[in-house]
């Protein structure tokens, strides 16, 4: 039986349950190691006139205080647009923006130093909201448009037209391990930085550039992360560079571990959006035209905002064929920490916006929103071209809709909810199905590359390291399975090595759900190359002219830990025994391979192209119960049906699906970012920022996988699973919206998150 | 002062550990991670709100160790004298993982692994008492642990599928016979520890406690420490003189006497929760969502009262019940009705030599209906936005008397005297409770904060009156049938 598809425990499971897995702050302390911290701006927008560190320098235990003047390289960086400073020079643009890096021997000294540093600053007027930024025309990047057909004429022929504005809240990644780095100084100004990051290569690039080193002088190693969710894609590097700076300047190991409070205050989050929409449709609910203006709150710098907005625009069709569609997008520059990647990367916001519109249409026509969704769903052979011109091949959504509708007893429950709501004085129920059609590939073409290094040792054991990083998602487990499958050897023979820029250079971030796709494909290529050489050697080994067996590489089979010539399979040799023989014949037993995703490209000017290799599709039905008086929300039941192709590891993938659903539900219900009018984040720890708890799980939770073996374009016929399930959580919010339609005579305006407060206040407003 | 000792004695994973000096003033999680290299215990929030730092806290009770989970980030070493702490590293026996760990591996209960040690410790502790856990057990027992990766389903499944036939209980891994005598021996000696900056005193009698309090103005009494330790961790407070009343045995009482419930000040909220389940079902429900199991295993009712938060979950209940507080001072005891205890925001009717020694709560009478409400953004492990409690006597659809207390609507928890007066003698109908709701908004002064806006709180005041009415109605209907 192939190891592909087997339910193997997570590669690090044993270490995790025993507490033996090592995270950055668990690494042993060197005797002369320094703690690194920083002093950030107390103001959201202010001129920095001067910094006086003289008093702080005198504090016992303070070893170094560094401002931008101490940076030997260029104090400017950013993954797409270079508009961010590591340390403020003259203008602070958000609360907590680092000004002084502090290196000390203990926490007490650092805390004293923070108080002793004098910042001479002049407050300027800040901008926090999308409305203010629009009014003052503060934008990041250029406005974008993607369109198809002619919306304006289509609105004229539409039977009904609805317009509105929809507000989508942000979301904190809330990885449990806060940003963490440990830097060791080396010879000749070199650095080794251990970092909890999704993007080790960016650490190298940014550290080298800011610290004035060559990239070959910096090595970044990532063993694992205690969660990432996008928050460690571009935003781990600030702190890694600070540790690097201290290590370089003091020649002592330097470690920085953010507290959860500081981490939440200074790092970026999922982008809040504010969208205007206009939709035209007929009395059946068939959408004729959709015009959307998306405005994201980018925060103070570009970070990944342009790509995130692009993905939001590309997902504004959700799962529906809309013949006339126009999507505009702008990123608002505000004085909040630069918003950044978070699982879904704009996709959830684009999709949610349209799902809100679907609920609006259903409520307007007094129809079941499922009917509207099913009616507008992309077709299989027709009505299958997206607004950006990509043909949606292998569309299984109609089948998923039908199957889930049936399996989830949607109809029966929809009807019984009506009855429940007319009888209950205290509670309301709602139900809704929401779909997922998530495009897989980085929309930035050049990032679609992966690499892997596979080395076989003389006892037949194998090491593999890829450009991908492990954040809990199970990448390493899947890579081990892929390599074991390629050589047809035991999974236990494969060891995954730390991700290191020394082994794989210029890697892409582990993001866009692409970890297994690109790095697994590269691992396959590496294994194939070695196997090819081994087959050549084995062919020689098994050839026997006297038996009429001439050397033939194509007849060599690797199966169940053995290698043989299929013309005389009984003369097999174990993989383990073959390796030392091959070594003696000077066969190369290592390979570094490179993969580039074929056929993806997207033209940003025209808004047309094929940005995705394929789609991961699915749908969820959620039923919710609301206490009319307190707004308390309970997910009574959730049913999920998702197509992830041929799963490499169903246990791992199931974990991704369920974790994603709950995280999406949290985004839209209990997770609320609250700021003071000065831009200070009030909800900066789990006491005030509420991610879902174990008791928030649906009472009934059915998760099934749609059978699909047609996805031949990706590694082992699998599909990416990291981000798509987050969008399944949208069904919880649309169910709340359905719920409130029972108390509102008119339109049901509901923003996100649907907290108890949002629900209570809306009910009061509707009544 | 009688003879004292200058050290804390505890066991960590079966190993005797004596602590003196500055280490006494460290948090348990820091001590484990940075002094003992026991880095399996993780710290995320440092405020007892995520459970990643969960460890087992073995407390000496009579002649055995009672093992409960606590958050090590908000347990300071000075609180741990006479205990046995078991960390994730101490769960193995003879180098083998336990069946809970096996089940977590098999069921994909861990993804990134950062919350995992906390979950494993919590779950293992639950299996000390039961061989099989239900879904409800697991949800009740694990709601003090947050996970961001799994969505919890795999963790629940792991818990349901544990094969306990080979589980070695803590008593089997760690022979109590070796530990208990040491812990019992030190119990009889008070602790006094003084460093350059700090002082810690743990008396074993009430008089010494009062005298010490009087002599050290501004001293901090640490009970469960679940709030004070958070403030210390977040740099909001740095107490130099700390006293623990944990060693005073007389404060341990928990009993029913003359139609009253008596709760000593060192009774933990979990002990109380178990004891009052049938006495005050509605209060039981509130305690059930008070913090988390870890918090309830540390926190006390007295601590919740003395902390004087306007959103304290237990106080509205004590208000409507007219609970009496016994205050212990150098001249003996005095009692005060809790309704008169709060003078303003965090200001108490408490002299500088006094501390709360016990709480007396009348039992419910037959014709009394008690209902408590807690509104929070998330149901479990969340601080209240708004709380309400009702104690009503009614007869044939008419209200004889009603006590109403609201929390989260001003600087202190309040009784709604005018609204109570209005409802007295009125019929139980919707219109009267709508009126009462409107009236209640005149008696409260809510503000907007991170947990909710002022308007939301005003709306909740109105809504909760209606909710109370409809719930009474539903219950009456059930009774009539």
Image (cartoon, coloured by chain):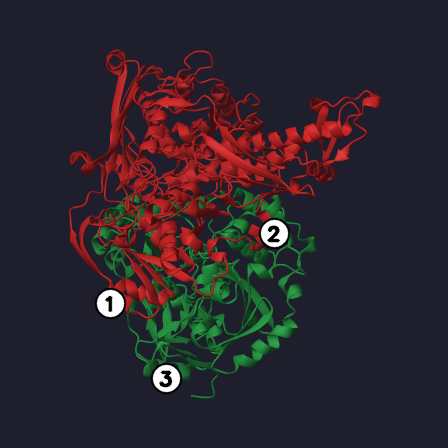
Rendered image quadrant of residue A335: top left
Q: Nearer the viewer, mark 1 or mark 3?
A: 1
Q: Secondary structure at mark 3?
A: helix
Is residue B344 in view from this perspective? no
Rendered image quadrant of residue A558: top right
Which residue is the site of mark 3? Answer: B211
Q: Secondary structure at mark 1?
A: helix
Which residue is the site of mark 1? Answer: A55
Residue at the image point whose x is 55% and y is 55% from the top: A19
* Colour for chain A in the figure: red
Q: Residue furthest right?
A: A546
Q: Measured along the vertical axis of the image, is residue A603 above or below residue B159? A: above
Q: State left or right for residue A467 relative to residue A5.
A: left
Which residue is the site of mark 2? Answer: B101
Label 2 Cα crowd, 10 Å radius (few <14 / some 14-19 / many 20+): many
> Are the residues tagged 2 and 3 within 8 Å (C-beta)?
no
Q: Residue B362's spot in the image, x, y percent?
A: 41, 66
Q: State left or right for residue A47 relative to residue A498.
A: left
Cα–Cα gap, marks 1 and 3:
42 Å
Q: Nearer the viewer, mark 2 or mark 3?
A: 2
* Colour for chain B in the figure: green
Q: Secondary structure at mark 2?
A: helix
Asked whether A757 or B470 is in front, the reply is A757
Please report, as a chain letter, where disc 2 is located. Answer: B
Residue at the image point whose x is 20% and y is 53% from the top: B442
Q: Residue B90's spot in the image, x, y percent?
A: 59, 62
Please report, as a chain letter, where disc 1 is located. Answer: A
> Are the residues tagged 1 and 3 within 8 Å (C-beta)?
no
Cα–Cα gap, marks 1 and 2:
51 Å
Please report, as a chain letter, where disc 3 is located. Answer: B
Q: Residue A153's spot in the image, x, y percent?
A: 24, 12
């Amino acid at each position: 039986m192939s190891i592909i598809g087997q339910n193997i425990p997570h590669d690090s499971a044993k270490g995790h349950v025993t507490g033996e897995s090592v995270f950055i702050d668990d690494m042993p302390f060197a005797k002369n190691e320094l703690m690194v911290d920083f002093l950030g701006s107390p103001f959201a927008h202010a001129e920095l006139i001067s910094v006086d560190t003289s008093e702080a320098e005198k504090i016992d235990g303070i070893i170094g205080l560094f401002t931008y003047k101490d940076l030997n390289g260029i104090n400017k960086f950013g993954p797409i647009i270079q508009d961010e400073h590591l340390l403020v020079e003259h203008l602070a643009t958000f609360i907590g923006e680092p000004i002084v890096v502090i290196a000390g021997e203990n926490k007490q000294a650092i805390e004293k130093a923070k108080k002793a540093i004098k910042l001479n600053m002049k407050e300027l007027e800040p901008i926090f909201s999308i409305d203010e930024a629009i009014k003052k025309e503060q934008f990041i990047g250029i406005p974008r448009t993607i369109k198809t057909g002619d919306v304006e004429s289509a609105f004229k022929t539409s039977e009904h037209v609805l317009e509105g504005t929809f507000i989508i809240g942000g979301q904190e990644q809330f990885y449990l391990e806060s940003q963490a780095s440990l830097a060791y100084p080396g010879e000749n100004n070199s650095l080794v930085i251990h970092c909890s990051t999704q993007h080790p290569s960016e650490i190298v690039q940014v550290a080298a550039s800011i610290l004035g080193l060559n990239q070959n002088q910096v090595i970044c190693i990532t063993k694992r992360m205690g969660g990432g969710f996008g928050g460690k894609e571009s935003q781990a590097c600030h702190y890694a560079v600070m540790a690097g700076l201290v290590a370089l300047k003091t020649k002592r190991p330097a470690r920085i571990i953010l507290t959860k409070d500081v981490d939440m205050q200074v790092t970026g989050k999922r982008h809040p959006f504010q969208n205007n929409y206009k939709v035209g449709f007929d009395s059946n609910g068939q959408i004729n035209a959709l015009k959307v203006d998306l405005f994201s709150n980018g925060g103070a710098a570009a970070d990944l905002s342009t790509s995130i907005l692009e993905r939001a625009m590309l997902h504004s069709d959700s799962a529906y064929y809309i013949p006339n569609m126009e999507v505009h997008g702008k990123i608002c520059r505000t004085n909040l920490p630069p918003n950044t990647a978070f699982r879904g990367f704009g996709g959830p916001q684009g999709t949610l916006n349209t799902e809100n519109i679907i609920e609006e249409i259903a409520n307007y026509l007094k129809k079941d929103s499922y009917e509207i969704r099913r009616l507008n769903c992309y077709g299989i052979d027709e009505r299958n071209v997206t607004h950006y011109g990509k043909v949606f091949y292998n569309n299984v959504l109609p089948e998923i809709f039908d199957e889930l509708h049936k399996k989830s007893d949607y109809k029966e429950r929809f009807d019984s909810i009506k009855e429940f709501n007319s009888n209950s004085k205290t509670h309301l129920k709602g139900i809704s199905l929401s779909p997922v059609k998530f495009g897989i590939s980085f929309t930035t073409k050049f990032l679609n590359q992966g690499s892997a290094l596979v080395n076989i040792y003389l006892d037949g054991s194998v090491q593999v390291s890829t450009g991908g990083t492990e954040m809990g998602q199970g990448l390493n487990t899947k890579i081990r399975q892929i390599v074991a499958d390629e050589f047809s050897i035991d999974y236990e023979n494969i060891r995954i090595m730390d991700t290191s820029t020394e082994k794989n250079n210029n890697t892409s971030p582990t993001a866009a759900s692409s970890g297994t796709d690109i790095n697994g494909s590269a691992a396959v290529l590496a294994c194939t190359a070695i196997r090819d050489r081994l087959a050549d050697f084995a062919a020689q080994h098994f050839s026997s002219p006297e038996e009429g067996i001439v050397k033939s590489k194509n007849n060599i089979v690797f199966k169940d830990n053995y290698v043989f010539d299929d013309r005389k399979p009984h003369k097999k040799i174990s993989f383990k025994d073959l390796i030392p023989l091959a070594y003696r014949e000077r066969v190369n037993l290592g390979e570094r391979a490179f993969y580039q995703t074929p056929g993806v490209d997207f033209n940003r000017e025209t808004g047309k192209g094929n940005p995705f290799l394929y789609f991961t599709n699915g749908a969820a039905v959620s039923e919710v119960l609301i206490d009319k008086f307190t707004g308390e929300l309970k997910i009574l039941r959730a049913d999920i049906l998702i197509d992830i192709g041929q799963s490499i590891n169903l246990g791992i993938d199931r974990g991704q699906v369920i974790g994603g659903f709950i995280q999406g539900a949290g985004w839209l219900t209990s997770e609320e970012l609250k700021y003071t009018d000065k831009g200070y984040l009030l909800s900066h720890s789990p006491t005030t920022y509420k991610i879902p708890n174990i008791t928030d799980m649906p009472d009934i939770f059915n998760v099934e996988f749609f059978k699909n073996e047609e996805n031949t374009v990706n590694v082992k016929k699998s599909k990416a699973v990291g981000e798509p399930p987050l969008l399944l959580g949208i069904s919880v919010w649309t169910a709340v919206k359905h719920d409130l339609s029972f108390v509102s005579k008119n339109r049901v305006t509901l923003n996100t998150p649907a907290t108890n407060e949002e629900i209570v206040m809306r009910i009061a407003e509707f009544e | 002062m009688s003879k004292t000792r200058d050290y804390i004695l505890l066991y960590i994973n079966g190993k005797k550990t004596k602590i003196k000096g500055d280490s006494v003033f460290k948090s348990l999680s820091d001590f484990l991670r940075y002094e003992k290299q026991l880095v399996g215990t993780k710290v995320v929030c440092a405020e007892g709100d995520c459970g990643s730092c969960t460890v087992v806290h073995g407390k000496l009770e009579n002649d055995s160790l009672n093992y409960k989970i606590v958050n090590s980030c908000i347990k300071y070493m000075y609180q741990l004298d006479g205990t046995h702490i078991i960390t994730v590293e101490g769960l193995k026996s003879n180098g083998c993982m336990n069946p809970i760990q096996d089940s977590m591996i098999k069921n994909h209960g861990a993804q990134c692994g950062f919350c995992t040690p906390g979950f494993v410790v919590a779950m293992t502790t639950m299996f000390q008492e039961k061989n099989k856990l239900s879904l409800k057990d697991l949800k009740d027992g694990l709601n003090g642990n947050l996970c961001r990766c799994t969505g919890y389903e795999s963790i629940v499944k792991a818990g349901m599928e544990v094969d306990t036939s080979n589980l070695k209980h803590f008593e089997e891994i760690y022979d109590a016979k070796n530990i208990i005598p040491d812990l019992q021996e030190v119990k009889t000696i008070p602790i006094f520890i003084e460093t350059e900056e700090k002082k810690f005193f743990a008396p074993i009698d009430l008089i010494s406690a009062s005298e010490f309090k009087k002599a050290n103005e501004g001293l901090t009494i640490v009970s469960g420490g679940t709030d004070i330790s958070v403030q210390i961790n977040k740099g909001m407070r740095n107490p130099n003189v700390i006293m623990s009343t944990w060693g005073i045995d007389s404060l341990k009482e928990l009993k029913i006497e003359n139609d009253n419930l008596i709760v000593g000040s060192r009774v933990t909220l979990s002990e109380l929760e178990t004891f009052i389940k049938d006495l005050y079902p509605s209060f039981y429900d509130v305690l059930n969502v008070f913090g988390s199991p870890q918090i309830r295993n540390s926190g006390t009712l007295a601590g919740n009262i003395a902390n004087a938060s306007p959103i304290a979950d237990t106080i509205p209940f004590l208000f409507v019940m007219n609970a009496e507080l016994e205050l212990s001072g150098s001249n003996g005891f005095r009692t005060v009705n809790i309704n008169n205890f709060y003078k303003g925001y965090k200001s108490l009717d408490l002299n500088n030599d006094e501390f709360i020694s016990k709480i007396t709560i009348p039992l419910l009478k037959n014709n009394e209906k008690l209902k408590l409400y807690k509104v929070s953004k998330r149901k479990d492990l969340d601080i209240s936005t708004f709380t309400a409690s009702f104690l009503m006597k009614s007869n044939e659809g008419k209200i004889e008397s009603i006590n109403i207390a609201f929390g989260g609507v001003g600087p202190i928890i309040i009784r709604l005297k005018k609204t109570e007066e209005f409802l007295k003698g009125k019929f139980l109908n919707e219109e009267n409770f709508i009126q009462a709701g409107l009236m209640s908004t005149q008696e409260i002064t809510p503000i907007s904060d991170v947990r909710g806006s002022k308007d939301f709180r005003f709306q909740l005041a109105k809504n909760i009156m209606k909710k109370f009415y409809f719930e009474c109605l539903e219950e009456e209907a059930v009774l009539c049938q």
